Image (cartoon, rainbow, N blue to C red):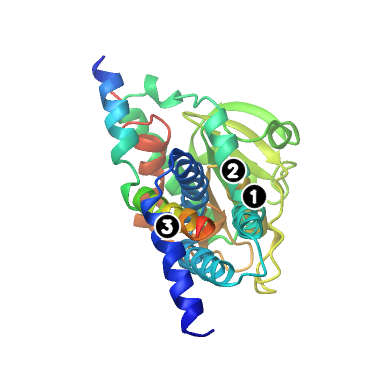
Amino acid sequence: MKKFGKFIVGVFTKNIGIKILALVLAAIAVALINI
Amino acid sequence: MGKEFWLEYWERVKAMAFGFDWSYVVEIIAFAAAFYIAFKILKENKGGKIIALFVAAVIGFGLAFSLSSAVGSEILVLVIFLLVIFVPTMFHTEIKRTLLGSGTKKHSKGEGMTVRDIEFIIDEITHAVQHMSKNDIGALIVLSNGNLPEGIISSGTIINADINAPMIEAVFYPKAPLHDGAMVIEGEKIHAAGCFLPLIQNDGLPQEVGSRHRAALGVTNVAEVTAIVVSEETGVISIAKNGEVKKKYASDADLRNVLSDYFWSDLTGKETKAK
């Protein structure tokens, strides 16, 4: 259970910089596609 | 582009912003996942600068296509798709290395070794490499976790001998039958010798880079291993990792650092595993 918790935390916190960048870029791309 | 155009464009932006649709969420998640994979590959393979180009290309093309009434949004989706495809094509060898590394179970051969065993092995390898360097004897040693492609091991001769300086020097002695290939060390054993490695195909390399160095770069490009090279011409010791020369003129301390990294973290997967 503890390992699973660590895994979940890791999924969200690992490479957080590029995750945020990918999400922001995806939002911009979707917005530009749908305009 | 007159005033009416911008007013109409602004209306479209407002309509999109206020007309929330669940399909947008799905699209964002799909795009974010594709971008994340592409960025991760780029970041792990020293392609950080390409991320900025990638972002600029998506925004640039996006703006151009959204402003142009002649081109449909499908073309923008296609351009983004092509950009995401372009990254794996450019870094195909690095992706292969990552996939080979993740698909292979690390042997963790260091687990049975004591601190004294590891210190002895590091001393012996360092001593042998330094001695060969002083005598201009060429050598290529690959520190592997059992993750080398099978063809490489089978191209040489399995030795499975204990690691000690006389044994390493005997293999690389210029008239010895196995001196021309690479020696593969796995944990506390010399696993194989006389192995043929893939040479790196890189036209950017200087002419003076010999086949031993090209082989070291080639093997570290296709597998997550470290290679130690002793130049036959100059006796210079170099260290290669991830398809590039980490230390062109490695000192005794550099050599020990690489070996310590291999035995204490690469091999066991933990900082202090040995008893």
Q: Which residue is mark 3?
A: B15
* Sequence-wise first label, 2 or 3: 3
Residue at image coords 59%, 53%: B84
Assess disc 3: are there few (<14), some (14-19) or many (≥20) residues with their C-alpha within 10 Å of its C-alpha: few
Quadrant housing the N terminus of chain B: bottom right
Residue at the outermost left position: A2
CA gap, disc 3 and disc 1: 45 Å
Q: Which residue is mark 2?
A: B97
Above/below status of B274 relative to B49: above
Q: Nearer the viewer, mark 3 or mark 1?
A: 3
Quick check: marks 1 and 2 in contact, CB under 8 Å? yes
Residue at image coords 64%, 28%: B159
Assess disc 1: are there few (<14), some (14-19) or many (≥20) residues with their C-alpha within 10 Å of its C-alpha: some
Chain identifier of the residue bearing label 2 in the image: B
Q: Which residue is mark 1?
A: B93
The picture places residue A30, in percent across and down from the top left corner, at 48, 53
